[in-house]
Image: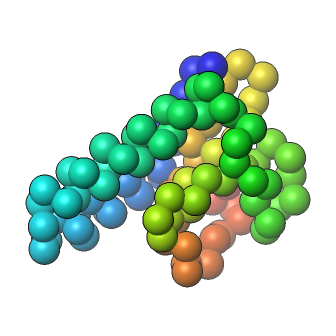
Amino acid sequence: MKIIWSPIAVDRVSEIASYIAQENPAAAEKRVDAVFRKVNDLQTFPESGRIVSETQNKTIRELIYGNYRLIYRLEEKRISILTIRYGKQILPVDEITV
């Protein structure tokens, strides 16, 4: 399956990396690399994420990685990475139902 990143998801990864890099640039790079590895695992196991509780939509799923929610939409021939959120943040549903 092909993985497509939404502009919001790309922005969120960049924000996370920038925040971590303020204290530790090497840790920021490791965290971003780990996020991309975790997302790439979806090519083999696309249904490995749980259904996002805010939507109860079977196609909107999330992987938990550390303190982050990697939220994606499972489609017929692709996986769309919708957003990445810190686990304690409120998830604006309009951000994932575009």
Q: What residue lies at 58% left-to-right and 21% top-to-bottom?
A: 2
Which part of the image, by quadrant, shows the N terminus?
top right
Whether 94 is drawn above or below 89: the answer is above
Residue 6 drawn above or below residue 76: below
Colour scheme of the picture: rainbow
From the top left corner, tell me how far across and down residue 37 is, in percent.
Answer: 42, 38
Query: Residue 66 appears at what percent x and percent y?
Result: 47, 65
> Can residue 69 be seen by looking at this rendering?
yes
Q: Write the residue at 31% across / 50% down.
A: 32
Q: Is residue 98 visible?
A: no
Q: Residue 59, image x and y in percent?
A: 80, 42
Horizontal and vertical percent position of residue 22: 13, 71
Q: Which residue is drawn at 48% across and 43% down?
A: 38
Q: Residue at x 66, y 53 (%)?
A: 62
Which image quarter: residue 81?
A: top right
Q: In this view, does 50 lie to the left or right of 10?
A: right
When asked about the image quadrant of residue 55, the answer is bottom right
Q: Is residue 12 above or below residue 82?
A: below
| Left or right of residue 4: residue 46 | right
- Give the camera-side residue of 8 and 60: 60
Q: Is residue 14 left or right of residue 12?
A: left
